[in-house]
Amino acid sequence: MAHSPEPIRAAGAVVIDDRNRVLVVHRPAYDDLTLPKGKLEPGERAELTAVREVREETGVRVALQARLPATRYRLGKRVKQVEWWRAAVLEIGKHRPDREVDEVLWLPLETARRKLTRDDDRTTLDAAVEAGSGPALIVLRHGKAIPRKQWKKKRDDLRPLNRRGKAQAKSLIPLLSAYGVQDVISSSSIRCLGTVEPYAKHIGAGVRSLDQLSEEGAEAHPKAVVATMEQLLAEARQSGRPTVICGHRPVLPAMLKAAGLPGSKLPKGSFSVRHLPA
């Protein structure tokens, strides 16, 4: 029995500005009005594709907000699957018309909904409006560190990242940038700080270090983890600033639960995202 070919993977964003206008593009090859999107490059994560495609097709730099339902449709003998996010505007640059996109338009919500060519684009736009414009909250597990057995010093909180962990920290820079993270918060342990410091340096920000989220702090005061996370969530909601919080495996179950995120485990160097209400 023949296997179905792998779907063509793509990603895009519904970009809505502070005047409730929607960013749409006209493609001359199809003579349609659509939302900016494009295919993943080999090895590229969908978040990065969405941000890159919006920038390439429109000149607009965006920050991802809410994850939206994916769309699937047939393209010849294959299925195309598009991952979607709602996105906020960071910077509006110029776009030079080309064969792929010859016109970039900012349309009022209802006008965009009426003029979009595809029904599934209208469905995605409706989902973006319903999701709202709140910031992303990211709970991150630190990168791979020197193993405990190989660490000769008594204080485990001083145990640093190993070579792989440092590479993971660098790889987080474009991913956290895709969400427009502005506030960087971490356990006070060196392996957590080392995971987020490259990104903080990239954006010219400091790292807010919290003993309450360290393994030692959580062991001494377990209830402080939940209280700290609840406070950080309230601050992110009030400020509207996308936020990353880095912690450890033993502390993650409490952190994720307090953040309203599913699951209790994350691989080292990976994260889970929640879209906060505006």
Image: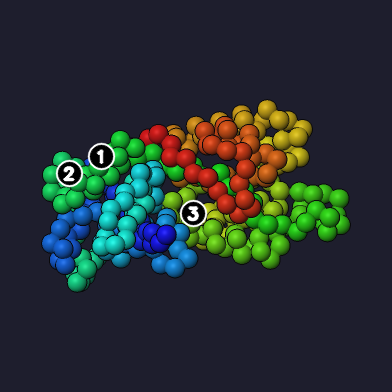
Observer able to see residue 56: yes
Question: Which residue does the numbered mark 2 point to in the structure image?
Answer: 113
Q: Residue at 19%, 46% (x, y): give it.
A: 119
Tell which of 173 and 43 is nearer to you. 43
Q: Determine whether, in the image, residue 168 is placed left or right of residue 90.
A: right
> Is label 2 in contact with label 1 (beta carbons under 8 Å)?
yes
Q: Determine whether, in the image, residue 248 is placed left or right of residue 7.
A: right
Q: Position of residue 172 (x, y in %)?
A: 54, 58
Give the structural element (helix, strand or loop) at label 3.
Answer: helix
Question: Which residue does the numbered mark 3 point to in the structure image?
Answer: 176
Question: Which residue does the numbered mark 1 point to in the structure image?
Answer: 126
Q: Position of residue 16 (x, y in %)?
A: 27, 46
How many marks overall? 3
**Sequence-earlier tag: 1 or 3:** 1
Up-down relation of residue 96 to residue 188 (above or below): below
Tell which of 177 and 39 is nearer to you. 39
